[in-house]
Image: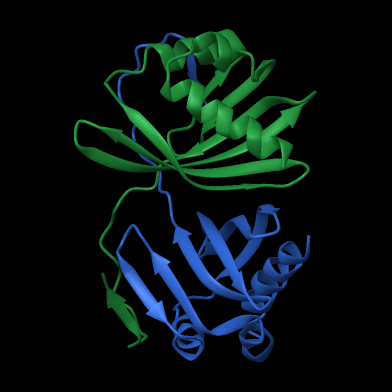
Chain colours: A green, B blue
Amino acid sequence: MEYGKTVEQYWQTLNDRDWQAFGALLHEGMVYEIPQTRERVRGKEAYIDFNKTYPGDWTLAIVHLVADQHRAVSQIAFRDDGQEQVGISFFEFKDGLICRITDFWPVAYEPPLRQSRFIERY
Amino acid sequence: MEYGKTVEQYWQTLNDRDWQAFGALLHEGMVYEIPQTRERVRGKEAYIDFNKTYPGDWTLAIVHLVADQHRAVSQIAFRDDGQEQVGISFFEFKDGLICRITDFWPVAYEPPLRQSRFIERY
């Protein structure tokens, strides 16, 4: 699970603001996308800048990490100012480096009326 | 990638409304959760009912699938009435059957003001 290790280091170095070690995991031509906002960042330096300038005194922790020979997916808990957000990231690799990250930030919503009677709220 | 195959069959049989084949992939004591709505369904029969009674003439297709020895994650395109939604599901297994599914449904949102100048919209 080599890619799993890379993703662990990715989150650890980001959490530590260790930009040199963080950058060492990224492919020069990497692409970062958030489909929900249709935002895109192209290139390693741009992506480091995006993270460096991200406001707040946030911390993060890995909740789930799944990796195979081609890809990895993580779920993180992103904590800032007493709030916790779920982040889900799909990672792709090239030459052992991260070449694509697709991030999702699912937020709470009110459920629709369900037709099944077997649903509980927690 | 045995669990990957199970998840492929899960989505195929759900898409086909083949409830017998769908149920054969599920552990009796399975738990299904949507953290965004804090909804939970307990047990195989209840979960089949939840899916059987889900309204609409929907179809779905796998976009990404990642699986390791312990877990699997899929991203699907869920299509209903001309609309397409992203669904992300984390799967856990017991005795070769699906024993836990955690579903996320991230929706579009307006991005916050970014401090980095390296962000494009697409």
Q: Going 59% across and 31% down the picture, which residue do you hit?
A: A101
User: Residue B44 in the image: x percent, y percent?
Assistant: 51, 86
In the image: residue A102, left or right of residue B18: left
Closer-to-camera residue (A77/A42): A77
User: Residue A90 in the image: x percent, y percent?
Assistant: 59, 40
Q: Going 32% across and 70% down the picture, which residue do you hit?
A: B39
Above or below, B57 relative to B64: below
Name the quadrant containing residue B92. bottom right
Name the quadrant containing residue A70. top right
Closer-to-camera residue (A29/B40): B40
User: Residue A29 in the image: x percent, y percent?
Assistant: 69, 15
Name the quadrant containing residue A98. top right
In the image: residue A74, left or right of residue A53: right
Closer-to-camera residue (B22/B111): B22
Closer-to-camera residue (B83/B16): B16
Above or below, B60 relative to A99: below
Q: Going 60% across and 55% down the picture, which residue do you hit?
A: B73
Quarter of the image where the N terminus of chain A is located: top right
Q: Going 77% across and 26% down the picture, which residue do you hit?
A: A94
Residue reaching furthest left?
A82
In the image: residue B48, left or right of residue B115: right
Q: How many numbered circles does the render carry?
A: 0
User: Residue B71 in the image: x percent, y percent?
Assistant: 62, 59
Quarter of the image where the C terminus of chain A is located: bottom left
